[in-house]
Image: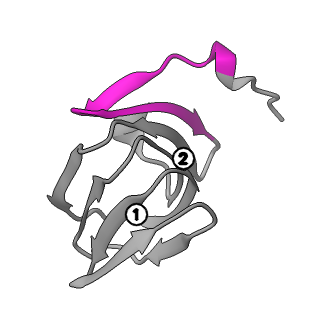
Amino acid sequence: MAFINLSDVKEREIVPGFRAKMVHSQNMTFAFWNVKAGSPLPEHSHPHEQITTVISGSFELTADGETKIMEPGSVVVIPANVKHKGKSITDSRLIDAFYPVREEYR
């Protein structure tokens, strides 16, 4: 078991405007994002299941061709290998959960 304080985790910029603190378990990765307004997330897919939750701000997400404006409390479940993209409308805070672990984020 590990107790982690996010203030002790180094933040990294993964995509321009998308900075995250990553926490990994044996089977999952959690990404705690701070995203600058106007920052685009290019379309991509990956073999990981993903659940995204908006904590603050407004974020436009397109998954499998369906676009939604996500606000605080919005959650989207993105199955493995589904193409998705996004854009932060305002400064935003998001949490992503990935299964299995995103090894490239370690």
Q: Amino acid at mark 1?
A: His
In this rendering, the answer to whether 104 lies above or below 57 is: above
**Residue 93 appears at what percent x and percent y?**
52, 44
**Residue 102 appears at what percent x and percent y?**
42, 46
Callout 2 environment at 10 Å: few (<14), some (14 to 19), or many (20+)?
Answer: many
The answer to whether residue 85 is left or right of residue 73 is left
**Residue 26 appears at what percent x and percent y?**
63, 45
For the record, the magenta segment spans 7-24
Residue drawn where x is 28% and y is 62% of the image: 46
Q: Amino acid at mark 2?
A: Thr
- Work out how far the residue at label 2 is from the one at label 1, CA to CA, in angstroms: 10 Å
Q: Secondary structure at mark 2?
A: strand
Placement of the C terminus among the 4 image quadrants: top left
The numbered dot on residue 84 is none
Residue under numbered circle 1: 48
**Of 11 and 40, which appears nearest the observer?**
40
In this rendering, the answer to whether 63 lies above or below 16 is: below
The answer to which quarter of the image holds residue 45 is bottom left
Q: Are marks 2 and 1 in contact (CB under 8 Å)?
A: yes
Residue drawn where x is 51% and y is 16% of the image: 10
For residue 76: magenta?
Answer: no
Residue under numbered circle 2: 29
- Prevailing secondary structure of the magenta residues: strand
Callout 1 environment at 10 Å: few (<14), some (14 to 19), or many (20+)?
Answer: some
Residue drawn where x is 59% and y is 19% of the image: 9
**Of 15 and 81, which appears nearest the observer?**
15
The earlier-in-sequence mark between 2 and 1 is: 2
The answer to whether residue 27 is left or right of residue 79 is right
